[in-house]
Image (cartoon, helix red, strand yellow):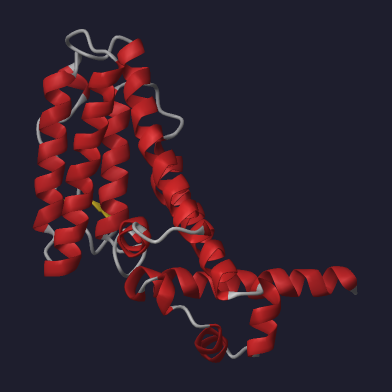
Amino acid sequence: MADGRVERGNQTRRAVLARTVDIASVDGLEGLSLGKIATDLGLSKSGVFALFGSKEDLQIATVRAARAVFVERVVQPVQDEPAGLAKVWRLCESWLGYSGRRVFPGGCFFYSVSAEFDSRPGPVHDEIARIRGDWARYIERLLDEARLAGGFREAADPADVRQLAFEVMAMMELANAHSVLHGEAMDYERAARGILTRLRAATAAPEELPERPPAFDFTAGRPSA
């Protein structure tokens, strides 16, 4: 019986977080309300409160749930590919698809909540900053693995890797911001062209990268054939 209660509690928690990540991507983490979520899901407010304890706890749990979705949709599809700039390109494709096909209704979840909490100190800010830092370091790591494997056309050092990672992230996030604001998929195509141009200029094996990015079909959630 105890195990059954625990499982029901876990199911309710998953249902709540599946709803809150979508709400927060559009309305922000401050837009989360225990009462509204309980009403939306047909739950008691006291039951939802018992699972999370406070709005801040709910916000942090929402950020962590969004991270799990991000890892599943963006990182895992390419994690087993061999080191090189081709792997970095496929990661960028994966990210552009994640944002463009609106895995979260508001576009990139972490772009949205970062803007909301970037100047607000506290545990929620710290959790967002930690995850954002992990993402930046992951891109830098993949680029550095490519460098160590001889994937760069010219000698590069860690500073060059960090600069390239910054430029790649900037293009992806600008595409997300413009697309969410203006509702145009062309921003993703521009970012893809810019990223691919930058990687092809750096790679020692241009044949491993496409000459141009594929046309993105965001209604299908992946590049079109």
Q: Residue at x 11, y 22 (%)?
A: 201
Of residues 24 and 224, which is closer to you in this image?
24
58 sits left or right of 75 in the view: right
Position of the N terminus by quadrant: bottom right
Of residues 1 and 161, which is closer to you in this image?
161
Relative to 203, is 167 above or below?
below
Q: Residue at x 50, y 83 (%)?
A: 33
60 sits left or right of 188 in the view: right
Q: Residue at x 46, y 78 (%)?
A: 32
Q: Residue at x 54, y 62 (%)?
A: 60
Relative to 100, is 195 above or below?
above
Measured as percent of width and height from the top left, residue 174 is found at 17, 52
Image quadrant where residue 176 sits: bottom left
Of residues 205 and 111, which is closer to you in this image?
111
Image quadrant where residue 181 sits: bottom left
6 sits left or right of 190 in the view: right
Measured as percent of width and height from the top left, residue 210 is found at 16, 30
Relative to 207, is 70 above or below?
below
7 sits left or right of 89 in the view: right
Residue 217 visible (yes or no): no
Measured as percent of width and height from the top left, residue 132 is found at 39, 46
Residue 25 visible (yes or no): yes
Of residues 213 and 133, which is closer to you in this image?
133
Image quadrant where residue 167 sits: top left
Measured as percent of width and height from the top left, residue 95 is found at 30, 47
Tally of numbered tags: 0
